[in-house]
Amino acid sequence: MSRPTAIRIFIADDHPIVRQGLRRIVEADAGLVISGEAGDAAALFDALRVTATDVVLLDVSMPGGLFLETLRDLRARHPAIRVLVLSVHPEDQWAVRALRAGASGYLTKDHSPDQLLEAIRRVYRGGKYVSPTLAEQLAKHLDGGGQRAPHELLSDREFEVMRRLGSGLTVSQIASELAISVKTVSTYRTRILEKMAMTTNADLVRYASRYGLIA
């Protein structure tokens, strides 16, 4: 009788200690195997060109590109690979956007190893992994019920710019980081302030801090 094929897991996180911890959890399960690791988006894509992988554990804050754009690019280049997003951010800040961008699941890093292993298996089988709290939130998004927080009204790019404004970056710094013009960032800033009914960057800093939108 042939032995079942192990699920191949790729870890994409910029913190070596986190990668080491995830590796230990995965390698302790006989049904899982590590296919590779990467600390930034470029290394992730380079590795996946030559590395057979079933599930990518993708950190929200990994450097090398905007998270949602990295996720969409990953799904476009490797549609057969499932993506389980891992994050220190609360589910209500990133999860819905991540699932819409192609993730198969979203798990905050305060969950137990057993929950991580359950999530890996579920997404590998083609399912979605969400917590009961997130499931309720998704239901509200589908039926249009419930009051939405101001930042949920932003587009994905506006959300990325808002987080950077909320962390105290200047328009010029954001333009350099996102490789877009200062004028474009200023336009985003105007839209963000209007949609969120705010007037200054200080308002955004206070809001981002209150909602845990910055690391």
Image: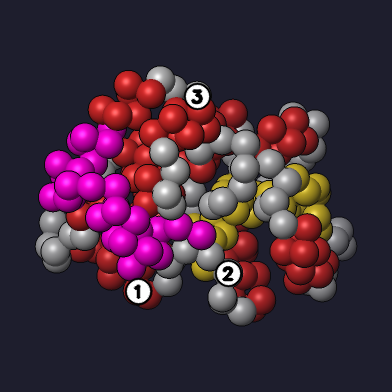
> Residue 82 in the image: x percent, y percent?
58, 48
Q: CA distance from mark 2 to mark 3?
A: 30 Å
Q: Quadrant of the N terminus?
A: bottom right
Left or right: where 82 falls relative to 8: left
Q: Which residue is depicted at the point 62% across and 36% down?
A: 64
- N-terminal-most mark, 2 or 1: 2
Majority secondary structure of magenta residues: helix
Q: How is the protein colored in the picture?
A: secondary structure
Q: Amino acid at mark 1?
A: Thr
- The answer to whether marks 2 and 1 mark residues whose Cβ atoms lie closer than 8 Å is no
| Residue 160 in sight in this render | no
At horizontal 18% and vertical 59% (from top left) the residue drawn is: 148
Residue that badge 1 annotates? 133
Q: Position of residue 180 (x, y in %)?
A: 44, 22
**From which residue to which does the magenta span run?**
188-215
Q: Is residue 57 above or below residue 70?
A: below
Task: Look at label 2 and name its amino acid.
Answer: Lys
Mark closest to the chain's N terminus, 1 or 3: 1
Decide which of tag 2 and tag 3 comes sooner along the chain: 2
Please give the label number shown on residue 109. 2
Q: Quadrant of residue 21?
A: bottom right
- Left or right of 47? Residue 105 is left
**Residue 171: percent from left, percent from top:** 39, 34
Q: Nearer the viewer, residue 167 or 52?
A: 167
**Residue at figure coordinates x 34%, y 56% from the top left:** 205
Q: From the viewer's side, name the closer residue of 59 and 27.
A: 59
Relative to residue 206, is residue 118 depicted above or below? below
Disc 1 packing (10 Å; few <14; some 14–19; many ≥20): few
Disc 2 from disc 1: Cα separation? 15 Å
Say whether residue 199 is magenta: yes
Residue linked to disc 3: 179
User: Tag 1's secondary structure?
Assistant: helix
